[in-house]
Image: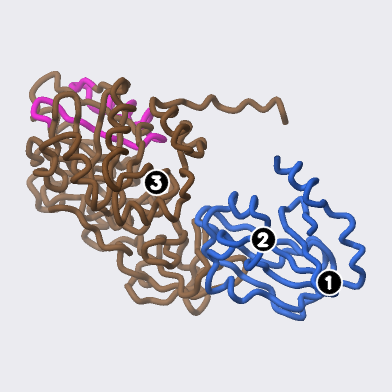
Amino acid sequence: MADLEEPELLHLGLEALHEALGGKMVPFAGYLMPVQYPDGVLKEHLHTRSAAGLFDVSHMGQVILRPRGSMEELKLAFEALMPVDVLGLAEGQQRYGLFTNDAGGILDDLMFTNRGDHLYVVVNAACKAADIAHMTAGMPGVSVEPVMDRALLALQGPAAEAALEAVVPGVAAMRFMDHRVFGDIWVSRSGYTGEDGFEVSVPEAQAEGFARKLLAQPGVAPIGLGARDSLRLEAGLCLYGHDIDTTTSPVEANLVWAIQKARKAGGAREGGFPGAARILKELAEGPERLRVGLRPEGRAPMREGVELFAEDGTPVGRVTSGGFGPSVNAPIAMGYVARAHANTGTTLMGEVRGKRLPVTVAELPFQPTTYKR
Amino acid sequence: MKYTKEHEWLRVEGDLVVVGITEHAATQLGDVVFVELPEVETQVAGGDEVCVIESVKAASDILAPIDGEIVAVNEKLVDSPSLVNEDPMGAAWFFKLKVDDLSVLDQFMDEDEYQDLIG
C-alpha cells in the first residue's frame, strides 16, 4: 500500500497565511485548502451570518474570454454553450451560467461578467481544465485565456460591505451582481453563502497583504470550506458534482430562473444550446424529477446518498447534499424527488442506518438571503 | 480512568463502567450535532456499535468496549449534543455498562499510554 502514488496536490498563494491562522489544510479538488480554522465549522458559519467571513476560493478557475472579432460574436458564441442570455447582459454586470451537454445535463455552473471588451468567467475548480477545453473547442473565434496569477477571495456577511469599503473605497455603492474594476482589484457583489458580500480577484503578489488588511477590519474572520458548504446548503445553492452533474438538467435542478426568456420557447434566440431539445421539452411539460429542499423531522442529519421513499414505501429519490444547518439549527438537505412527490409539505421517508425516518419537502432557501439588490 | 484505541474513556463507578469519548476524539469529530443512544437493558458484546454521533462533518459510531448490559444512557446528549464538545470527559458520558468482572478493564490503556497513542 505504501507504494500507492498519490496525485500531487497543488498549492495556492495564501497557504502560508492559512497555516499562520491555524487553518486545517485538506485536499480539495486537487488543491490543499483550509477546511476550518481553530473556531471550527459551526462557529465559523454563525460568524459569517452575524459579521463577516473571509474565504479563499483561489482554487476556482478564472478565465478571460476575448473576442477575435466583435464582442457580439463572442457573446453569441458563449450563448451557444449555455441556455442563458449573454447578449442581454449589460457592461459591469455579472450573471450565473451553466454549460450543458447534448443530453441536457450540466457540465458545470459558473459566473460570467461583461467587462466591455471581454468576458470574465469564474468556474469550479474540479471542472476548470474540462471547461477551458470545452470553451476553446466550442468557440473557435474566441481567445480563451486562463488567469493564472490571481487569487480569488470572498468576503461574505453583514459586515462585509464596511470592511471592504475601508480597503477598496467605492464598493459600497455596488449592488448585487455588479462588477467593478478598481485598478488591479476586480470586485463582484456576489458570493455563495446567501449573504450580501463580495468576490474579489487580486493579483497573487498582493493577495496576502490584501487578505491581512481585510482580516484587520472589524468583524472579519477567516472561514474554511466546511462552513462554506453549510452556508451554501442553507442558502439552497447547488454544489457541482453533488446537486448538479452531467445527468441532471437545469430544469430538474430547479434552476429555471437561470434560463432567461430570450432562450426559452418563443424567445428572441430560442434554443441553440446543447441539450435544447430536452431542456425546452422539460420547460414546457415539467421535468420527471425536481431538486427540492428537505427537512428531516428528527435531529438526525440526512446526508448525500440517503434514499427517499414515499409513505407507501415506493422509492422516489435521493439526497444529494445534506447535513446540519447551524443558522436554522436543524438538519437540512437537498435532493431529487419524483415530481408527484416534490410539492412543498409532502412527507417522505429517508433511510438512515437502515431506519426510515420522516422528512418533509421544504421551500428553498432554508435561510433567507440578504443580497443588496 | 482507562482508554481504548477507539478513543473512548472508561470510568469505574461502583460496579458499573461509564463510557464516553476522549477530548482528542471530540476535537477530531468537530461540532457534534446529533447523538443516538442505545436502549437501556440491552445486552451488548465488545465491538458492537451502540451509539451514533453525527458532527457537522460526518457520522461515526461508538462501540461497546466490552460485553455487558446497558443500564443507563445520558439522555441530555440527545437534546444538547454540543455537550460532547464542551465537556467530553465529564458531563458528556454516553452510557453505563454492568459487567460481570471489572478486571476486564485491565486490558485497556492508562492515561500515559493513551497520551502516547495520540501524541
x and y percent of residue A109 in the render? 30, 42
Distance from disc 3 to disc 2, alpha carbons, whole Å, reads: 44 Å
Mark 2 residue element: loop
Closer to us: A174 or B9: B9
Q: Amino acid at mark 3?
A: Asp
Question: Mark 2 belongs to which subunit?
Answer: B
To which residue does mark 2 refer? B89
Residue at screen point 65% across, 74% down = B74
Residue at screen point 70% across, 78% down = B39
Q: Which residues are magenta?
A: A115-143
Distance from disc 2 to disc 1, alpha carbons, whole Å, reads: 21 Å
Query: Any magenta on residue A121?
Result: yes
To which residue does mark 1 refer? B68
Q: Amino acid at mark 1?
A: Gly
Of badges 3 and 2, the one in the foreground is 2
x and y percent of residue A249 in the render? 33, 51
Which chain, by letter, is brown? A
Q: Amino acid at mark 2?
A: Met
To which residue does mark 3 refer? A245
Quadrant position of residue A106 = top left
Task: Judge if badges 3 and 1 mark residues of a common chain.
Answer: no
> How many neighbours does mark 3 have within 10 angstroms: few (below 14), some (14-19), or many (20 or more)?
some
Can residue A103 be seen in the rendering of this structure?
Answer: no
Can residue A75 be seen in the rendering of this structure?
Answer: yes
Task: Judge if badges 3 and 2 mark residues of a common chain.
Answer: no
Question: Mark 1 belongs to which subunit?
Answer: B
